């Protein structure tokens, strides 16, 4: 693709930049501050409402559903400009716009699209992802949460099981949920996809205390949860196709549009090296910066290429995993470099050094990204087999009914 803006794209970028300059600063998160998750959630909703009111939410969705009916290129441009600000755009908001809405738009019916898309774009509905399980993380198709038809004439489903690593489930309104409805077929074929109100009786969320001190992840327990059949997306047994739509959106959106290297360059440029110069006078540090910046730019351009494919109706498939794989590795290395530049202060910062405290948090959190959205090893297998055409791993469970599997 051509990475230079066309005249129309340049005009759109100027419009987006001007609107953001007028509205984004009031919503930026304070530097170095780790606020309560309830406050961050409130800020996320407020920014979603600001975007919607300004006509910048759901750019690629039809106007009838609250969007603007634009192409993927405009969405990339706006994301690039929006990424220049430190806005509350974490999982609390991105799960809805980046995961729930794409699957509802593609696999839902007209009533579901009308019910959920515009309300989510407005910030009136927020979402969590109920996918991973204690025994089925990277092997999502091995999930054991099951749904059976209610023993009455309602057509409802009764769900029992446990999900884990459910980001923001304790604060969000709805969840996207995949369950097993047919154990007599191979594991990828017996899954069905639902949307579920997280206030439904029988749903319990328990925040998980993390090494970073935060608790946005949850265990989610579902005990005799009754879900109307009207909340099913797609046909029975079509759950795996729905999951792939969600995961492609998650992986395409994994790369951060906000540069992680440029702030480090600014920091190094004003930090003395102890020899009368700055850290940028050190050739080895400049080399590390050059490598990090090249990786960041390469990933950004590759992500733009894949989003262009999507805007043309093409399916990137396993190529989307390359974005997430590259981002997770780069994010961890960049945060590691940020700590190294601070020397001993990176290990034990002063109490009032909130900036270094934030870098510490980001470095600890970066380990999560090597697992969330697909572990590195799983993504490498997918890329090797589906992109490079290498022989697949031997699978003993292929074509075996799920109920016959051991474990």
Image (cartoon, helix red, strand yellow):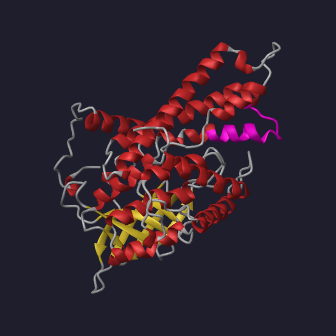
Quarter of the figure that contains the N terminus: top left
Q: Nearer the viewer, residue 156 or 379?
A: 379
Q: Nearer the viewer, residue 302 or 127?
A: 302
Please say whether residue 332 is one of the residues in the magenta stretch: no
Q: Nearer the viewer, residue 384 or 351?
A: 384
Q: Estimate the x, y position of residue 210 in percent, counting from the top left.
A: 60, 48
Q: In the displayed image of the protein, which residue is found farthest to the front?
A: 7
Report the magenta residues as a range.
Answer: 346-362
Q: How many marks overall?
A: 0
Identify whether 93 is placed above or below 377: below
Q: In the displayed image of the protein, which residue is found farthest to the bottom?
A: 153
In the rendered image, which quarter is residue 49 located in?
A: bottom right
Q: Estimate the x, y position of residue 113 in percent, counting from the top left.
A: 40, 72
Q: Residue at x 67, y 25 (%)?
A: 340
Q: Residue at x 37, y 74 (%)?
A: 231
Q: Estimate the x, y position of residue 281 in percent, counting from the top left.
A: 72, 16
Tell me, yes or no, if residue 321 can be seen here: yes
């Amino acid at each position: 693709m051509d990475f230079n803006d066309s005249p129309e794209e340049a005009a759109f970028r100027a419009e987006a930049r001007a609107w953001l300059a007028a509205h984004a600063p009031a919503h930026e998160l304070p530097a170095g501050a780790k606020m309560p998750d309830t406050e961050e959630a409130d800020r996320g909703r407020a920014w979603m409402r600001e975007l919607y009111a300004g006509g910048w939410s759901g750019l690629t969705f039809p106007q009838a559903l609250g969007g603007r009916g634009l192409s993927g290129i405009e969405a990339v441009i706006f994301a690039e400009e929006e990424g220049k600000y430190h806005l509350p755009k974490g999982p609390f908001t991105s799960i809805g716009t980046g995961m729930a809405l794409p699957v509802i738009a593609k696999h839902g019916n007209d009533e579901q699209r009308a019910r959920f898309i515009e309300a989510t774009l407005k910030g009136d509905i927020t979402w969590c992802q109920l996918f991973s399980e204690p025994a089925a993380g990277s092997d999502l198709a091995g999930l054991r949460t099951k749904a059976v038809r209610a023993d009455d004439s309602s057509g409802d489903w009764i769900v029992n099981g446990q999900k884990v690593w459910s980001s923001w489930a304790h604060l969000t309104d709805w969840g996207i949920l995949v369950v097993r409805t047919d154990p007599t077929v191979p594991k990828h074929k017996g899954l069905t996809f639902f949307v579920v109100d997280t206030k439904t009786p029988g749903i319990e969320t328990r925040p998980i205390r993390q090494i970073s001190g935060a608790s946005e992840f949850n265990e989610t327990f579902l005990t005799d949860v009754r879900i109307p059949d009207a909340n099913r997306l797609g046909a029975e047994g079509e759950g795996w196709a729905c999951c792939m739509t969600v995961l492609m959106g998650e992986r395409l959106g994994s790369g951060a549009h906000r540069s992680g290297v440029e702030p480090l360059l600014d920091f190094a440029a004003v930090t003395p090296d102890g020899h009368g110069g700055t850290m940028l006078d050190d050739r080895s540090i400049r080399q590390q910066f050059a490598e990090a910046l090249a990786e960041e730019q390469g990933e950004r351009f590759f992500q733009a290429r894949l989003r262009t494919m999507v805007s043309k109706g093409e399916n990137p498939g396993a190529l989307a995993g390359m974005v997430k794989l590259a981002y997770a590795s780069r994010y961890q290395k960049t945060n590691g470099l940020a700590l190294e530049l601070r020397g001993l202060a990176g290990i034990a910062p002063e109490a009032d050094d909130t900036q270094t405290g934030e870098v510490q948090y980001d470095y600890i959190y970066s380990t999560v990204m090597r697992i969330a959205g697909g572990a590195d090893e799983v993504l490498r297998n997918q890329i090797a087999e589906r992109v490079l055409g290498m022989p697949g791993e031997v699978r003993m469970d292929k074509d075996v009914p799920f109920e016959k599997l051991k474990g």
